[in-house]
Image (spheres, rainbow, N blue to C red):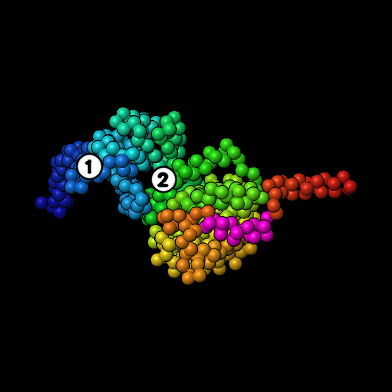
Amino acid sequence: MSVIEARLTQRRLLALVLCIALPVVSLAQAGKPAGPERFEQEILAFEAADKTSPPPKNATLFVGASNIRRWTSLAQDFRNQTVINRGFGGSYMRDVLYYADRIILPYEPKEIVLQAGGNDLNGGRSPKEVLADFQALVGKIHARLPRAIITVLSIPPSEARWSQIENIRSANLLISRHVATDPRLSFIDLFPHMLNAEGLPRTELFIEDKLHVNAQGYALWTSLVRWQREIQVLAESDRKSPPPVGCIVFVGSSSIRLWKDLAQDFPDYPAVNHGFGGSQIFDSVVFADQIVTSLKPRMVVFYAGSNDINSGKTADRVLQDFRAFAERVWARLPDTRIAFISIAGNPARWQQVEEVKAANKLVEDFARSDSRLAFVDVFTHMLGADGMPKPEIFVEDRLHMNRLGYDIWREQLRPYLKQELRPGSREEPLMTVMGQLAVIARDCMLR
């Protein structure tokens, strides 16, 4: 046999092997579940874990695709809540629907946080099909758990799937419109928070695959899930009773929220209370546009940081986040002044006092670098002769202040406000503009 004939024979044999092998491969692929059954092993693993350690009822259950499954810090991020993670990577909205009887309903959660739909679109399903599966899922849940709150995280924008952005926007719009028909549903639009000034995905929120979020992305999602209802309440209050342009916005954590006599303490100034209890500085960064810049205030009085340090954040991180807050405000309102009330020392968290002092020092130094900033020291005025917090200015929890404590804050803030703002200046910004226009008009007439 010649060399050429031998090679022809080898090729015929190879072709014969391929003809036999391809049907076998096809049969093997055909044997793999193409529908929701492909997740059966993961669901069985959830059920086995539940038998070993049954989850409690009335928890907050997170369910959906890989961005939920990969949320490994969930328990820490929501440490004041009981949370259950039932994310399974690669899942569609219809897969969540299919397994709802096994990974949602048995837990009887009080709230369900859902993030799904992106894989559906990536797999060729239409926005209307995603909506139909979502509606069916909601119907199944509320048939068994009529009081359950369902919070939907929108399909997020990502660089990896930017070519599908129109379908993503369409699906989000359809779902948000359906959510608006039922008070038990809420929709969190991730787009305003995950796109940069150019309207593109913020790369710093994603891991290397440009699809899944990183720790910074999860911090953003945590803030949105935790506070969106309180922010909506504040926004609704502003809508019903719009604060005057040029007001003073007090923003921050519970010590601001609990300042019930704020308006009476500063009767000469249009003070607005936008505190939300338990919040950290980063939360005010996330919601700055909704609770600060949208009001176009002349001044912001800011108090937060104690919760940050209590959660394990460093003094450097406190400064970093406050700097981000200031920059966020100035991006929209470059002339707005910001007064930072020093982080208070309190008996309940006195073991953290050195980190508190370090954070206050860093913010005070930062405030000296910009004339639009001020640092208002209340820390030293809340201490007694023994250098310890005055016990009589705190309520029973030894963390929050009573009226005596707020009297100290009022007295430390009042000179600063008097120096920076003229009393009764609610209409001053408008009058200033009108006066300038009058001067221009007069000059034109004289010419």
Q: Residue at x 85, y 48 (%)?
A: 443
Secondary-structure class at tag 2: helix
Residue 258 drawn at (x, y percent):
50, 50
Q: Of 348 and 35, which appears nearest the observer?
A: 348
Q: Of 87 and 271, which appears nearest the observer?
A: 271
Q: Is residue 430 visible?
A: yes
The correct choice, above or below, for 386 with respect to 178 in the image is below
Residue 269 drawn at (x, y percent):
65, 50
- Asked whether disc 1 touches disc 2, contact meaning CB atoms under 8 Å apart, the reply is no
Outermost residue, front direction? 392
Q: Main secondary structure of the magenta part?
A: helix
Residue 188 drawn at (x, y percent):
44, 41
Q: Residue at x 36, y 50 (%)?
A: 80
Mark number, residue 43: 1
Q: Which residue is mark 2?
A: 225
The correct choice, above or below, for 268 with respect to 107 in the image is below
Q: Residue at x 40, y 35 (%)?
A: 185
Q: Crowding near pointer 2: few (<14 within 10 Å), some, many (20+)?
A: some
Stretch in magenta: 404-421
Disc 1 vs disc 2: which is toward the camera? 2
Is residue 418 shown in magenta?
yes
| Residue type at the position of mark 1 | Ile
